[in-house]
Amino acid sequence: MTHKIFIDGAAGTTGLEIADRLAERSEFELLRLDDATRKDPAARREALNEADIAILCLPDDAAREAVEMIDTSGGTRVIDASSAHRTSEGWCYGFPELIGSERVADARRVSNPGCYPTGFLALVAPLVRAGLLPADWPYTVNAVSGYSGGGSMLIKRMIEEPNIAFRTYALDLAHKHLPEIQAHAELEHPVLFAPSVVPAYRGMIVEVPLHLGAMDGERHADDLRTALAEFYAGSDVVTVHDATPVSELLLDTDAAPSDGLELFVFGNEGGWNARLIARLDNLGKGASGAAVQNLNLMCGLPETAGLILPKN
Ligand SMILES: NC(=O)C1=CN([C@@H]2O[C@H](COP(=O)(O)OP(=O)(O)OC[C@H]3O[C@@H](n4cnc5c(N)ncnc54)[C@H](OP(=O)(O)O)[C@@H]3O)[C@@H](O)[C@H]2O)C=CC1
Ligand SMILES: CC(=O)N[C@@H](CCC(=O)OP(=O)(O)O)C(=O)O
């Protein structure tokens, strides 16, 4: 059986990467709109309703509009890569490792996690759930992203302004990922989020520094690493690195696409201070790889088929 897939926003950064991952997969038939019609509402409506699964790779407003175009009595299921529905009622949060693959498989409306939230939630959500980290802690998130994370506009800007070596932003402390992060980690407070961009096309590092010694109760960095390793033991996507000391973590300016997610826990000598760090491709597990993983599940296919992973 082939599944009809329509990528709305197929000409954009995320849409193109999804198409790359689906290329030559016989399980799917891609419905395509040409350049003249790809933004035409009537053509989109028709393709959205013809598809078995529509993957929305659009700005938030256009994603909301696309959902409204889909006939609710029809059969089209949705994966939304935008941030429009990440805390919306009736939507499944498409992070199978955290919510369970079967819930994604059964869902009609799946919202793909954001790239930064993917790193933060992978590190913190299992530890809060296990009671190893407090839900009422004022968490800080320092993060650095490749510029493709900002889509076609930021890509253009970073190419036109090659003098930019580092760009920190969201200085109003009101980044759109805050509600998603708080909701899905089940935290009592919004996090303090400090994102930045470097002149690399893809890749990101998301870091949560923790004063473990200042928290009530006793916990050691090693306990956190062990708990994460147990939580992700069955995953082909998430790797929890062991305690082998490394002195640095790098992002490459010309990294190849990857759909894996690497987690690290570093601690000081006594284990009272920790740095929880996630390294991922913002366009991989942070967007397109996650969409394909969810698509596989929704179609009853092997979860990691077509993903760019060391083991595939
Ligand atoms: N880039 C990333 O790393 C990640 C992106 N996302 C999310 O994925 C979504 C897409 O992002 P990204 O691919 O980076 O963005 P891009 O800007 O690269 O692509 C968006 C695409 O949507 C098209 N588009 C805009 N409005 C409409 C419309 N009304 N109808 C049809 N097509 C339209 C654009 O066309 P045109 O250029 O002609 O306007 C463009 O091709 C966003 O919501 C983003 O937040 C999520 C996680 C990570
Ligand atoms: C570098 C950069 O600009 N990144 C984007 C987030 C990319 C991403 O996660 O997309 P969503 O917004 O759909 O979640 C930003 O900070 O807005």
Image (tube, rainbow, N blue to C red):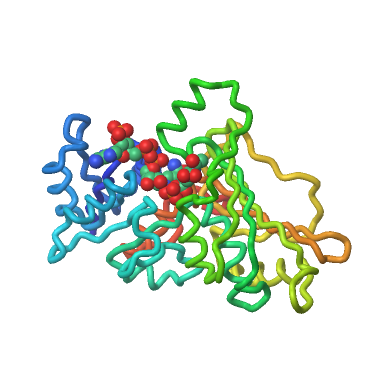
Name above or below for residue 183 compared with residue 16.
below
Quarter of the image holding residue 190? bottom right
* Residue shown at 56% from the left, 41% from the top: 145
* Residue shown at 12% from the left, 48% from the top: 46
Q: Position of residue 29 (x, y in %)?
A: 24, 48
Name above or below for residue 138 compared with residue 245.
below
Q: Position of residue 285 (x, y in %)?
A: 49, 52
Quarter of the image holding residue 171? top right
Q: Position of residue 183 (x, y in %)?
A: 48, 67
Q: Quadrant of the image for the N terminus?
A: bottom left
Image check: 44 left or right of 301?
left
**Front-most of residues 147 and 13:** 147
* Residue shown at 37% from the left, 50% from the top: 82
* Residue shown at 55% from the left, 38% from the top: 146
Name above or below for residue 81 compared with residue 137.
above
Quarter of the image holding residue 135? bottom right
